[in-house]
Amino acid sequence: MDTSTAATAPAGYKVAVTEQRKGQILVFERTAQFTDANVKWSFSTGNAPGWDHPFEIRFRDTKRYGAIALMTFGKPGEGRAGIVDVTGDTHLTRADLLWSARITTYPHSIERVPNAGAVVVAGSRDRLHVFGPSSSDLASLKEIQTLSFTKAHAVLWDDQNNLLWVTGGTVVRTYRVNGTMRNARLEKYGPDITIAGNGHDIQPDYSSPGTLLVSDSHHVHWLDKKTRKITKTVSLAYPKSYVRHSSGQAMWTTDPDPDDSRWGGPTVHFSEGGDRTRPGAEIYKARLYTTQFH
């Protein structure tokens, strides 16, 4: 796979990983070893029913709480979406949740639409779940809309074009968000974009703000947000997440053994070298620790 960049040394930034074996979300400095002693922030579920297998971690800014973390967990038929405040304690548990909801459609991703206050969860079986608050209190979030979307795996807000991007199966689709709070509703916008395999993730290319990175079962696609055209495709076996830092350095995770019952491996890969391995871990996704949309 072509992951070359102009940078020759690791950039300094924080990385968040979803570790499915122990039901943890962990944050490390990119240049540190991914050991327990180097954990900068964590959320631990105790692998309670519905809270095992973390699939998503995303950080966003809010006026009321400052930075929050949005997360999804679970197995088919029994999952959870949750939000915590990340401006206080370093090591959090389910007791620190500001909001959570039971999601039975195998939730793989979650996003917050900032001006509308809505939260969207991708249930990978067959639908999108839209939640709206009655106030700035996140505890007031209530499900207000569901939309059919087979194999919905990833959602991402595009603040440059005011669109919600979603991928699942061989489709990338966009939605407008009309209204705010409990009146927020998603409306399909524009033609669907076809990709080769089962769409798994959408991330910004922070080194190219007009570009999204869409990963499917065997590829990573560079997608121009304005033209809706795929400008580049590279091969990568079973990627679960792929992102580029503003320095141009890429970071990704894969499923190293698609024939076993686990969905991740112990290693986070970096294009400039210096991969990080956490022995025994089952890392599904790796995210940049940032609240920025692009």
Image (spheres, helix red, strand yellow):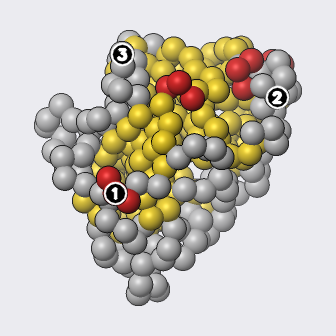
In the shown orientation, is residue 82 left or right of residue 195?
A: right
- Residue at the image point whose x is 31% and y is 76% from the top: 273
Name the mark on residue 136: 2
SS state under label 3: loop
Q: Where's residue 254, x and y in %?
A: 29, 51
50 vs 293, nearest the viewer: 50
What is the CA distance from the residue labelled 1 to the residue labelled 2? 36 Å
Q: Element type at marker 2?
A: loop
Seen in the picture, residue 146 relative to 154 is either above or below; the reply is: above
Q: What secondary structure is found at the residue carrying circle 1?
A: helix
Nearer to me, 20 or 250? 20
Mark 1 surroundings: few (<14), some (14-19) or many (≥20) residues within 10 A: few
Counting from the top left corner in percent of width and height, residue 228 is at: 63, 53
Instruction: Specify whether residue 169 is in view.
Output: no
The quadrant of the image that shows the N terminus is bottom left
Q: Give the mark nearer the N terminus: 1 vs 2.
A: 1
Would residue 39 be found to the left or right of residue 176 on screen?
left
Residue assigned mark 3: 49
Q: Earlier in the sequence, mark 2 or mark 3?
A: 3
Residue 37: image tag: 1
Report how many numbered discs are placed on residues in the image: 3
